[in-house]
Image: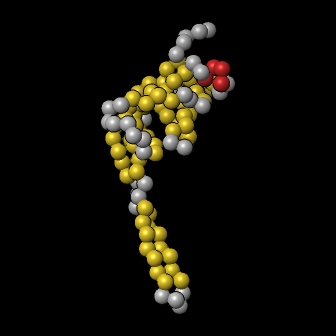
Amino acid sequence: MYAIVRAGGRQEKVAVDDVINIDKVSEEAGATLTWEPLLVVDDGKVISEASELSGYSVTAEVIGEAKGPKINIIKYKNKTGYKKRMGHRQKYTQVRVTDIASKSTKK
């Protein structure tokens, strides 16, 4: 079983025990996050209707913080002596997906 969730401005494909990096959130390590999925695939059955998805939830536990790769930005203009160097390193929060559950088991 896996689900597609919107986390930190992006959509992520998650399954139980996956560790993903999302944009930094203010939660402490050990806190629990809950998302409503956009799509759920359960044993080949694809669930994408909003009325059916309202019965599902994805929970995740915050592991800690992480940093992305360093990005170097260099600006240069020929014959003017203009050089500018900048850098950027994105901050992320690592989370482990603990459960993809149905809130109600109705048939």
| Quadrant of res 45 | top right
Q: Which residue appears farthest toward the front when viewing the image?
A: 26
Name, please, the residue furthest toward the top.
107
Q: How is the image coloured?
A: secondary structure
Residue drawn at x 33%, y 41% is 64
Quarter occupied by the C terminus: top right
Q: Residue at x 52, y 16 (%)?
A: 103
Instruction: Name the residue located 58 percent from the left edge and 27 percent from the top edge.
Output: 40
Q: Residue 88 placed where, x, y %?
A: 43, 61
Q: Is residue 26 visible?
A: yes
Horizontal and vertical percent position of residue 41? 58, 27
| Residue 67 place in picture, x, y as percent | 37, 52
> How many marks can you see?
0
Nearest to the observer: residue 77 or residue 102: 77
Question: In the image, residue 2 lies at what x, y percent?
Answer: 52, 29
Mark yes or no: residue 21 visible.
no
81 vs 48: above or below: below
Above or below, comparing residue 89 to residue 31 in the picture: below
Farthest residue toward the bottom? 79
Does residue 67 appear to the left or right of 104 in the view shown? left
Q: Is 50 drawn above or below residue 82 in the view shown?
A: above
- Please name the residue shown 42% across and 35% down the image: 18
